[in-house]
Amino acid sequence: MKIIEGTTDFALPEKSAVAIGKFDGIHLGHQKLLSQLTAQKAQGLLATVFTFDTQASAFFGGEEKELTTKAEKRAAFEQLGIDVLIEFPLNSKTAATAPEIFVESYLAKRMRAAYICAGPDLSFGKGGAGDFNLLSRYADRFGYCTELIEKVRVDGEEVSSTRVREAVRLGNMEEVRRMLGRAYSAEGIVEHGKKLGRTLGMPTANLMPEEDKLLPPNGVYHTQVRFGGTECVYRGISNVGCKPTVSEENRLGIETYLYDFAGDLYGREITVEFLSFRRPEQKFDSIEALRRQIAADIAAGREDS
């Protein structure tokens, strides 16, 4: 997959099929749209995703946490068969581009779009004034065709990044999984902690996700862990939070005990996938009380695995 980043001056070498959007979460609705996009490769078109190098809502003073980080999006797009990913610079100048100029200068001339697919909530250009109807009005003039991709519904409601985000914030990981078609996850490099789990006979892997990654509420979760994008998976139980019993730091992290694993994970890349919520994070009166609760959590997780 070719990645174009940090520039507004680019040109694709061939005609392309284009999808425009933030794609935060890459949920089932996004996957449906991207499937239609990659189907156009059979017509000789480059499957091209146009998104932004900064989350639009954060740029305009809204949501700052992301369901999927830049690295996670890149990996997902490549796995889904995207040929070209354009991470367009979002700043005061580019945000002020009139939608008609965007269609002519970028879609028609720079991306050589022959096919554009979008959902009914598409918005682009200055003030978000560009939409699917505007794209369609210019189709004949610039020689592309458009396809409207209807929303996907789960549990009777439309799937959206906003709905997924709300479910994550509530810790409803089962609902999140239904909307994503996969477990919600966080990835990173295993770091050295205070080794308290090891002294308690329950060694854990400590992960510090990127700061802009949205995590579920502080608490204990049934999880599974993948190593470096491989198919090697271990069931585990994870704590999201700041470990208030043993630390005064306010650094949010994920601490995971892996079932049936023996080995050294320090410095390795892992992905923690959240399956279900067990209990809120809490501060215990003593290390021994913490040890008993961790042991109970681990036992309960093993019964469910």
Image (spheres, grey):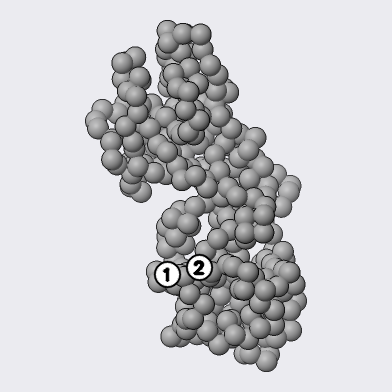
Question: Observer-nearest residue: 70 or 222?
Answer: 70
**For this view, does 54 lie left or right of residue 262?**
right
Residue type at mark 2?
Answer: Glu
Residue 159 appears in the figure: no
Q: Circle 1 sits on which residue? A: 3
Is there a contact, CB below 8 Å, between mark 1 and mark 2?
yes
Element marked by disc 2: strand
At 33% from the left edge and 36% from the top edge, which residue is drawn? Answer: 191
Question: Observer-nearest residue: 97 or 47?
Answer: 97
**For this view, does 197 lie left or right of residue 178?**
left
Relative to 154, say whether 20 is above or below: below
Element marked by disc 1: strand
Q: Quadrant of the C terminus?
A: top left
At 61% from the left edge and 73% from the top edge, which residue is drawn? Answer: 94
Where does the image place residue 105, in percent across and percent down from the top left? 59, 85
Q: Circle 2 sits on which residue? A: 87
